[in-house]
Amino acid sequence: MTPVRRIIIDTDPGVDDAIAILMALAAPQVEVVGLTTVGGNVSLAQGTRNALALLEFTGASQVPVSRGASRPRRGKYLYSHEFHGKTGLTRRMPAPSIRECGEPAVEFMAGRLEQHPREIDLVALGPLTNLARLHRRYPGVLAKGRSVTVMGGAVGAPGNVTPHAEFNFYSDPVAAREVLETGVPMTLVDLGACRQVWISREDAAASHEEGPLGRLAAEILQGWFEQDPRRDRFEFYDPLTMAVCLDPDIVGSQPVTLEVGTEQGSRWGESRVTGEGGPVSVADEVDAPRFFALLETLLGIKGS
Ligand code: RIB
Ligand code: CA
């Protein structure tokens, strides 16, 4: 069956990344062209291992994994083991026997976007280091994507690293600024949107999906809650971003001109609207029932 959609997922798996990847693997008529990995939630090596393990475990070993950046444009990645657990996945996964493809992430993305202009959707779920490198090394190629959907930023919402900064932007604000300034039309799914869709501990515990993808997603979610008894809700950051790529009408959005704080100090990684109109459409209203209907269809997970 000819795929209707073809997606490259740039990712730092990560619990919520994993659920977003499982959604794409479960989506009918979607071809996951590849996973490009980036440091962020965990090290590049660990994130790449997690990506390979997820694909092999779910019978999707044919999907190429291409390693990207191990460091941001400036400094080092934060890593977020307190949230994502020691390995970055809150369910023990068999060590992968498959290996990443030899092509580096930037060349992987550039090659596919050049070969198939306007056919491949790009979904960015981690720090934007790979996308910034792609733009620097291959100017104009990012615009050859069919669409670009980014999880990042805290536009008019409190951050989750500092009061002003969201994790992906905080991890590499220079890259985030470069990507947002390319002028390429993109949809930004920020914390303000993501916090509108979440699942409670009880609902996660009640998720018993039959299929392997849904079962793994439920186990990862349950594992996340088990990590800390104080956790009462899991917010769907990367899954909402993936859902927006699959069904853009899940959110409303506002076109803005956005800048990212790259000055050291309290504004590091802050996302600031500097004007109305512009190439970046920031998701605002989320059609939560529509999102949860898609999540249940794909992975059998019922939201709160
Ligand atoms: O701020 C949330 C984002 O940071 C998500 O992509 C999560 O996986 C982490 O990377
Ligand atoms: Ca992520």
Image (cartoon, rainbow, N blue to C red):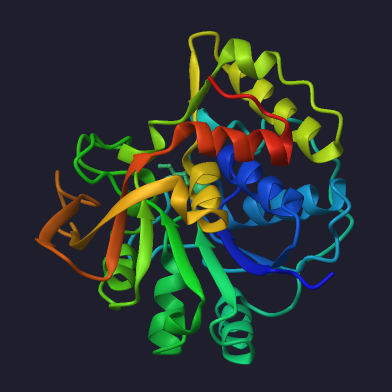
User: Could you tell me residue 99's position as x and y percent?
Assistant: 82, 64
Residue nearer the viewer, 207 or 176: 207
Please tell me which residue is depicted at 74% across the width and 30% down the height of the picture. Answer: 91
272 on left or right of 289: left
Residue nearer the viewer, 50 or 74: 50
User: Could you tell me residue 201's position as x and y percent?
Assistant: 58, 14
Residue nearer the viewer, 154 or 80: 154
Please tell me which residue is depicted at 38% across the width and 32% down the height of the picture. Answer: 195
Specify the quadrant of the image occupied by residue 97: bottom right
Please tell me which residue is depicted at 89% across the width and 52% down the height of the picture. Answer: 59
Compared with 121, 21 (above or below) is above
User: Could you tell me residue 83's position as x and y percent?
Assistant: 51, 30
Compared with 113, 177 (above or below) is above
Compared with 245, 18 (above or below) is above
Q: Is residue 12 visible?
A: yes
Residue nearer the viewer, 300 or 231: 300
283 on left or right of 202: left
Q: Is residue 81 visible?
A: no
Compared with 236, 232 (above or below) is above
170 on left or right of 256: right
Which quarter shows the N terminus? bottom right
Please tell me which residue is depicted at 60% across the width and 35% down the height of the picture. Answer: 293
